[in-house]
Amino acid sequence: MNHQSLRRIEQVLTGRATSDGAGVSLTRYLYGPQLQQRLDPFLMLDAFGSDDPGQYIAGFPDHPHRGFETITYMLEGRMLHRDSAGNQGLLDSGDLQWMCAGKGVIHSEMPQQVAGRMEGFQLWLNLPAADKLCEPWYQDIAADQVPVLTTDNGSRISVVAGHSHGVAGIIQRPRTEPLYLDVSQPANSREQHSIAAGHNAFIQLYRGRLSINGQSVAAPTMLILDNPDGSTAVEIEAHSDCRYLVVAGQPLNEPIEQHGPFVMNSKEQIYQAIQDFRNGLMG
């Protein structure tokens, strides 16, 4: 593949320490209008990881969502999900949950452990304007349901969404066409990942050190990839054993209006969401 079609690092983000829910410590990498525009259709990415139960045990009690999808990926630990539609599911190490909040859902995510490491990611994916008020749904995905492939270079790739090396992920979404890969790449190897032309993309490096086009970075960090015309892949050189997410999606190019857990297209729709929540019309 010629180097014109390979993407480069445009920006390196170290994230900012914050807390959410009932005071759970996490690092927020993607947030705010500028990054939401740049990484459209993605709205937020939180990384959580701690050996200290005091930092996670209070969890995320009941809270509402409207207008987007959440992808919760547990690397380690156990999290119990309950929602206002009567669904409940237990996420264990390596499990995922894909939830479409649509017109509104109230849910809680509570750790089911009092010791040991709790680590994972939550990614918010926007819904197109036409689907913002769709019926909510969610899917719990056990680790062994996620298609896994091993490349000739020895990388192990879990294909959560989209396609990689001819393997289809367990989730396919129209319109935003998300790609979500979890990659374990061995030291001193090179790996290419296809990314659709025109899609916004980032690498979330959470173990090890790698370089892209000669630019070297160490975990933990988010790497926003550039998006020049005709670029269809990224090449990653691992300097140590690495683990990282490859995330990409088709931009919606629609107005984004966010107020906490509600993401709509106009202020009027946000006011309506707040009113509906107050009037008990969510979930």
Image (cartoon, helix red, strand yellow):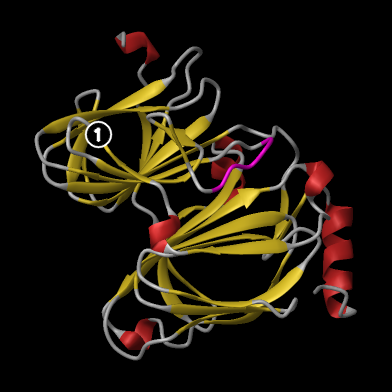
Q: Is residue 254 above or below residue 92?
A: above
At numbered mark 1, what does the secondary structure look like: helix, strand or loop?
A: loop
Q: Is residue 149 visible?
A: yes
Residue 60 at what x, y percent from top left?
Answer: 55, 79
Q: Is residue 168 magenta?
A: no
Is 47 located above or below residue 165 in the figure? Answer: below
| Residue 260, horizontal then vertical, whole percent | 67, 65
When the figure is inspected, residue 202 is found, relative to residue 65, above or below; the finding is: above
Please name the amino acid that badge 1 sits on.
Thr
- Given residues 54 and 116, the one toward you in this image is 116
Q: Is residue 265 visible to us here?
A: no
Q: Main secondary structure of the magenta part?
A: loop
Find out whether residue 173 is within the magenta segment: yes
Horizontal relation, residue 191 to residue 258: left or right = left
Q: Residue at x 60, y 38 (%)?
A: 40
User: Would residue 270 be found to the left or right of residue 91 on screen?
Assistant: right
Q: Residues within 10 Å of mark 1 (few under 14, many from 20)?
A: few
Q: Residue at x 37, y 87 (%)?
A: 113
* Residue 191 drawn at (x, y percent): 24, 30
Which quadrant of the figure contains the C terminus?
bottom right
Residue at the farthest bottom position: 114
Q: What residue does disc 1 label?
A: 151
Q: Which residues are magenta?
A: 171-175
Left or right, residue 206 beside residue 19: left
The residue shown at (39%, 13%) is 5
Which residue occupies the foreground of this view, 146 or 178?
146
State the residue at coordinates (80%, 60%).
135
The spot of residue 96 in percent (x, y) is: 47, 62
Question: In what quadrant of the picture does the N terminus appear?
Answer: top left
